[in-house]
Image: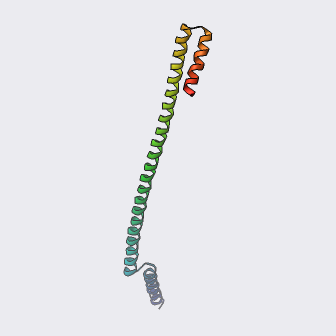
């Protein structure tokens, strides 16, 4: 009698263990739904990532255009400044050359008169 009771207890324990395993592991249908959900989520996340990358590329292109415009604008302004400096240097060089030429030709008094004449002729 003791062995029969022990055997029955062992069978009941084994059946309980099988039932616990069955309840703990997902069924085939639940596993299919889970795998399908994973595939759908993966595809959707990939779609979102591609869309974000496309938008980022567009932003980078716009930034490049704006930076290019700004660089061209800055280069144009620098060129204007250099041109004006060259013009000023040319004027100063011409004026010094004239003064030097007139200084050799006339006295200091004559130089000051010629400077006034140059200034009056440019202003007037």
57 w.r.t. 45: above or below: above
The x and y percentages for residue 16 are 46, 84
Q: Residue at x 57, y 16 (%)?
A: 114
Front one among 16 and 35: 35
Residue 11: image quadrant is bottom left
Seen in the picture, residue 2 relative to 42 is either above or below; the reply is below
Q: Residue at x 53, y 26 (%)?
A: 88
Q: Nearer the viewer, residue 72 or 106?
A: 106
For the C terminus, the quadrant is top right
Q: Position of residue 105 (x, y in %)?
A: 54, 8
The colour scheme used here is: rainbow
Q: Is residue 47 above or below residue 79?
A: below
Displayed quadrant of residue 31: bottom left
Residue 15: image location, x then y, percent? 43, 85
Name the residue located 55 percent from the left edge and 26 percent from the top edge. 122
**Which residue is found at the position 38% from the left and 68% from the top?**
43
Rendering coords of residue 10 (x, y %): 45, 84
Residue pushed farthest bottom? Answer: 1
Labels in figure, total: 0
> Relative to residue 107, is residue 75 depicted above or below?
below
Answer left or right for 93 relative to 113. Answer: left
């Amino acid at each position: 009698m003791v062995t029969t009771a022990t055997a029955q207890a062992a069978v009941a324990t084994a059946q309980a263990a099988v039932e616990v395993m069955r309840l703990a592991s997902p069924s085939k249908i639940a596993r299919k739904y889970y795998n399908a959900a994973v595939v759908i989520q993966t595809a959707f996340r990939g779609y979102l990532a591609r869309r974000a990358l496309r938008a980022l590329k567009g932003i980078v292109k716009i930034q490049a255009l704006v930076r290019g415009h700004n660089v061209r604008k800055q280069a144009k302004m620098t060129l204007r400044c250099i041109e004006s400096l060259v013009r000023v240097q040319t004027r100063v060089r011409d004026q010094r050359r004239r003064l030097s030429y007139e200084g050799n030709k006339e006295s200091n008094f004559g130089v000051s008169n010629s400077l006034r004449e140059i200034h009056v002729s440019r202003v007037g």
